[in-house]
Image (cartoon, helix red, strand yellow):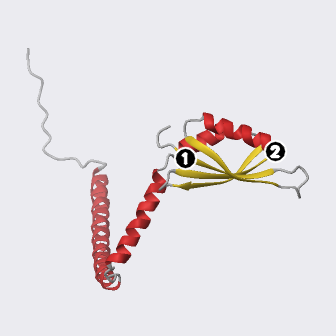
Amino acid sequence: MSMPALALDFKRTPRPWAWLGVLLLAIGAVWLAQVVNSARTLSGQIDLAEARQHSMARHSRIKLAAPPLDAEALQQQIKQANAILQQLDLPWNALFQTLETTRDKDVALLTIQPDATKHRVRIGGEAKNLPQLLVYIAHLEQGRVLRHIYLTSHEIRTQEAEQPVRFTLLADWADQP
């Protein structure tokens, strides 16, 4: 077996797509230059914004420094905050569920006024008549949220045609239903 003849061509022939690589390299270089320029611009804007922020922070510390509160005013603010926390800590969902489940078409509730310090709630409303009001109170007493429900006032509205009864109830509000 003989070896095939080896053909050596020492003259290089130009490739038809060689200019494409040079063009892509030039486009990449232009794009890189734009990215670097944008980064420098953004860096300058960030530095300027940080300088403004520091300047504004220095000025705001000077202007917003509040005068020291006296002990009495501070105690009053603490009492107000504690009262608000007591109001928020009440079992509102249990109360509203109880009132929703005991609703009556002949009784309309007009006001609900909680007293967090005494764990009491004052409920005002209007009933079609006095027997309907007494039935409503009995239904409320069967629930587990309100205890010791008392009818503190009632008024028969004689000037109106159906003569409804406007009432106010006072009840102890149980912490745990």
Q: Of the residues shown, which amino acid type is indicated by label 2?
A: Asn
Q: x%, y% of residue 36? A: 27, 67
In the figure, is residue 49 to the left or right of 6?
A: right
User: Residue shown at 46%/60% (left/top)?
Assistant: 84
Instruction: State the mark number for residue 25.
Output: none
In the figure, is residue 122 to the left or right of 76?
A: right
User: Residue shown at 67%/36% (left/top)?
Assistant: 139
Looking at this view, name the residue that lies furthest to the top.
1
- Relative height, residue 45 to residue 32 (above, below): below
Q: Secondary structure at mark 1?
A: strand
Q: State the quadrant of the N terminus.
A: top left
Q: Of the residues shown, which amino acid type is indicated by label 1?
A: Asp
Q: x%, y% of residue 40? A: 27, 72
In the figure, is residue 44 to the left or right of 134?
A: left
Q: Disc 2 or 1, which lies upstream in sequence?
A: 2
The residue where tag 2 is placed is: 129
Q: Is residue 102 visible to the viewer in this orientation of the structure?
A: no
Q: Nearer the viewer, residue 129 or 102?
A: 129
Q: Residues within 10 Å of mark 1 (few under 14, many from 20)?
A: some
Looking at this view, name the residue that lies furthest to the left.
2
Q: x%, y% of residue 14? A: 24, 49
Q: Is residue 131 visible to the viewer in this orientation of the structure?
A: yes
The residue where tag 1 is placed is: 172
User: Residue shown at 58%/51% (left/top)?
Assistant: 121
- Relative height, residue 64 to residue 153 (above, below): below
In the figure, is residue 60 to the left or right of 137?
A: left
Q: x%, y% of residue 62? A: 30, 85
Q: Secondary structure at mark 2?
A: loop
